Amino acid sequence: MDKNLNQLLKWSIEAQTAANAGQSHHSNGAPTSNNSGPAAGTGAVATSPAPQVTGSGPRPVDPEVLASLFGGPSEAELMKAAMEVITDPSPETTRENKLIAFDNFEQLIENLDNANLLDELALWSPLLSLLDHEDEDMRYHAAWCVGTAVQNNQKTQERLLAMGGVPKLVDLAMKEGESEKVRRKATYALSSAVRNYQPAMDVAADEMHKRGHEVLVNNGTKVDAADMDKVDEVIDCLRNKAKSA
């Protein structure tokens, strides 16, 4: 049986069971009071009151189940649809609609499972390409989404690095002539990308070195990605450079 149909069936059974229990409880009127006993002289045996129905009814149905069964889009489909709007070159899709789609996309990938779907849905390439968009706000939102996707998530940190995203972020964070807000958002994304993930930290350090910024700790070794204080020093330096942009 289909997994979603099976879940809906279980919910239906729970709902019917709860309904039946409620009907049984009320079918003969109010239950006998705990204080009532057999009528004097009748020899009747005292009975226990009717069992009480506990709980608040069946568990709510998972919205994903209902969406699957009744044709609503899944969150993966919403992610793909949002990216199609963002990258749509036709003049019918306004800039405002693209930015709204970007906001929706960012909210969707706040969910760890959705962020992990970026690779499966082939959305990393279009997302990273938007870091080079001619529109400042598009670059800003692209960096924001990258930062959200890789925050505290080694799987997406690995994919970002493999897709060449770390050098792009360093370039955007240090680019002369770029706006402060874009540079700061790229710095945020870079911060999320390198924390607790040494391969990305090493690549970021190399890229920053190419641009004249030496990323070394006092003893001459590279920054430990697990040393939050040292990572903060690197990121704070980039933030300060962005302020002076």
Image (cartoon, helix red, strand yellow):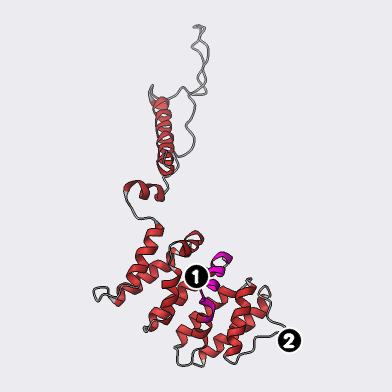
C-alpha gap between disc 1 and disc 2: 32 Å
Residue segment shown in magenta: 154-167
Q: Horizontal and vertical percent for residue 235?
A: 59, 82
Query: Mark 2 Cα within 10 Å, few/some/many (few <14, many 20+)?
Result: few
Q: Say left or right for 217 vs 126.
A: right
Is residue 158 depicted above or below 7 in this figure?
below
Q: Which mark is residue 55?
A: none
Image quarter for residue 210? bottom right
Badge 2 amino acid: Gly
The residue singled out by tag 2 in the image is 220
Residue at the (50%, 62%) spot, across then down: 116
| Helix, strand or loop at mark 1 | helix
Which residue is farthest left?
A: 92
Q: Say left or right for 82 vs 235.
A: left
Badge 1 amino acid: Thr
Q: Horizontal and vertical percent for residue 240?
A: 56, 89
| Helix, strand or loop at mark 2 | loop
| Closer to the eye: label 1 or 2 | 2
The residue singled out by tag 1 in the image is 148
Q: Horizontal and vertical percent for residue 226?
A: 67, 72
**Front-most of residues 218 and 100:** 218
Q: Is residue 162 covered in magenta?
A: yes
Residue at the (49%, 84%) spot, across then down: 172
Nearest to N terminus: mark 1 or mark 2: 1
Q: Is residue 158 covered in magenta?
A: yes
**Front-most of residues 187 and 205:** 205
Image quarter for residue 161? bottom right
Q: Say left or right for 211 vs 146.
A: right
Q: Main secondary structure of the magenta part?
A: helix
Is residue 141 depicted above or below 46 in this figure?
below
